[in-house]
Amino acid sequence: MLAQTMAESTQALPVKHYENFPVASWLCPPRLRAPIAAIYHFARCADDLADEGDAQAAQRLSDLQAFQADLSACAERRPHSGRWPVVFDTLGPVIVRFELPVTPLTDLLEAFTQDVRYTAARRRYQDDAELLDYCRRSANPIGRLLLHLYGVHDERSLKQSDQICTALQLVNFWQDLSVDTPRSRWYPSRQSMAALAVVDADLLGHGNTARAALLIEAYCAQARSLMLAGASLALRIPGRAGWELRLVVQGGLRILDKIQTMHHETWRARPKLAWVDVPLLLWRAARMRPTSASRE
């Protein structure tokens, strides 16, 4: 759950990653650890195909298409290609046993494919609506899949899950600015940059950093608002799963605190959670109460 590296499977996941919110932690209900890990490995491997290594865009797109074909095979109870056995040997039975919906998994692959295409073409998000649509496919499916495993299907819970997941994705964008922008992965929209007269050099730390900080501050405020709007979902999910989600929420808010502490200048360094944050997160998780925003 907290700041640590997951992705230990060397066959399907050759790249190790820092994660804000690793899944299948000790708080996760034991019976769901295996299916949650299967979903995580699927998403992590697909993300690596889109983002890691030195492959050209055409090869990445081809690999993601093959990955999609293996997902379709598993959903239809057909043999997969065998290229990613650690992923699909475990995910296939999970889809069958838990009647896991395939659309959210497909949405994830569409988002990773979009990442490849945007980066290769140096394409930028024109407005925040386009950015949020990307979050709908790149982040929200994970929350909906977890709710499915927990047996939660009501519309209010799905909406709040989307709010939390979108907030987490946005937190990750603004946390990772120093990593993404040098790689031509730009998530601030042109519309929002223009509204504050921010240019690329500002977000690389070479121009008017005061304007850039205002932009990141506004984006972080948006992420915090979404997180707080969805937070009461963690109070309605019973048992260990609810505590897991409480810590996910508090982890996201803690990263936003760290971004604020560095005056929103995340082009300088990447703020991270560490084990020293654990007592504070546990205390905040225990004190969570419904807010006016989360009751709506």
Image: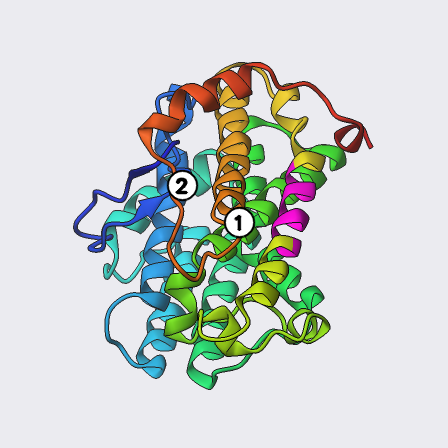
* Residue 28: quarter of image: top left
Q: Is residue 248 left or right of residue 158?
A: left
Q: Which residue is mark 2?
A: 20
- What's under tag 1, amino acid-wise? Val
> For the residues marked 2 and 1, what is the alpha-carbon distance in whole angstroms?
10 Å
Q: Which residue is mark 1?
A: 171
Q: Quadrant of the N terminus?
A: top left
User: What is the x, y in percent for residue 182?
Assistant: 38, 72
User: What is the x, y in percent for residue 193?
Assistant: 64, 72
Q: Residue at x 48, y 25 (%)?
A: 244
Q: Are marks 2 and 1 in contact (CB under 8 Å)?
A: yes
Please tell me whether mark 2 sits on a helix, a strand or a loop: loop
Count of numbered tags: 2
Q: Quadrant of the C terminus?
A: top right
Seen from the viewer's position, the closer of residues 271 and 294 is 271
Q: Residue at x 52, y 50 (%)?
A: 263
Seen from the viewer's position, the closer of residues 226 and 52 is 226
Seen from the viewer's position, the closer of residues 279 and 234 is 279
Q: Is residue 13 left or right of residue 38?
A: left
Please tell me whether mark 1 sits on a helix, a strand or a loop: helix
- Tell me the magenta residue range: 218-227
- What's under tag 2, amino acid-wise? Asn
Neighbor class of circle 2 (other Cα within 10 Å; few <14, some 14-19, many 20+) is many
